[in-house]
């Protein structure tokens, strides 16, 4: 009988990770979609190129944090 409970716990942990990633993915997608217009125009303005690079770096950091947090420990 312990194997049945162990299987349920492993499944519950997996489901919990999936739900957490899905909930965290929604804000990342909203922010990414909000950045798209800026990322289309800012790189073409010399004074705003650094700002566009900062925005891309932040998006990459948020995505990396989401992926690292979703990995099994």
Image (cartoon, rainbow, N blue to C red):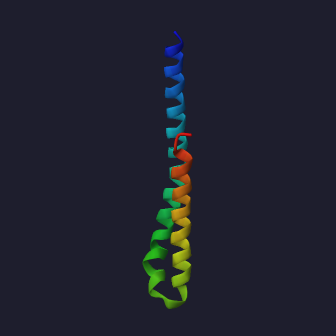
Across and down, in percent, residue 27 comes to 54, 55
Camera-side residue: 2 or 29? 2
With respect to residue 67, does 34 lie above or below? below
Residue projecting furthest to the top: 1
How many marks the image carries: the answer is 0
Quarter placement of the C terminus: top right
Q: In this view, does 10 lie above or below 43?
A: above
Residue under the point 51% across and 64% down: 60
Q: Residue 71 in the image: state x and y as whole percent.
A: 52, 44
- Vertical placement of 71 versus 5: above or below? below
Q: In this view, does 69 lie above or below 59?
A: above
Residue visible at 55% across and 42% down? 20
Q: Locate residue 15, reporting x and y percent.
A: 50, 33
- The residue most toward the front is 73
Q: Where is residue 32 in the image (x, y as percent from the top left)?
A: 49, 63
Residue found 53% across the figure and 40% down from its top: 72
Residue drawn where x is 55% and y is 82% of the image: 50
């Amino acid at each position: 009988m312990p194997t049945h409970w162990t299987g349920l716990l492993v499944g519950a942990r997996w489901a919990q990770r999936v739900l957490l990633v899905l909930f965290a993915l929604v804000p990342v997608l909203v922010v990414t979609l909000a950045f798209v217009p800026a990322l289309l125009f800012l790189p073409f303005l010399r004074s705003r190129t650094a700002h566009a690079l900062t925005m891309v770096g932040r998006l990459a950091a948020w995505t990396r944090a989401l992926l690292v947090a979703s990995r099994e420990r």
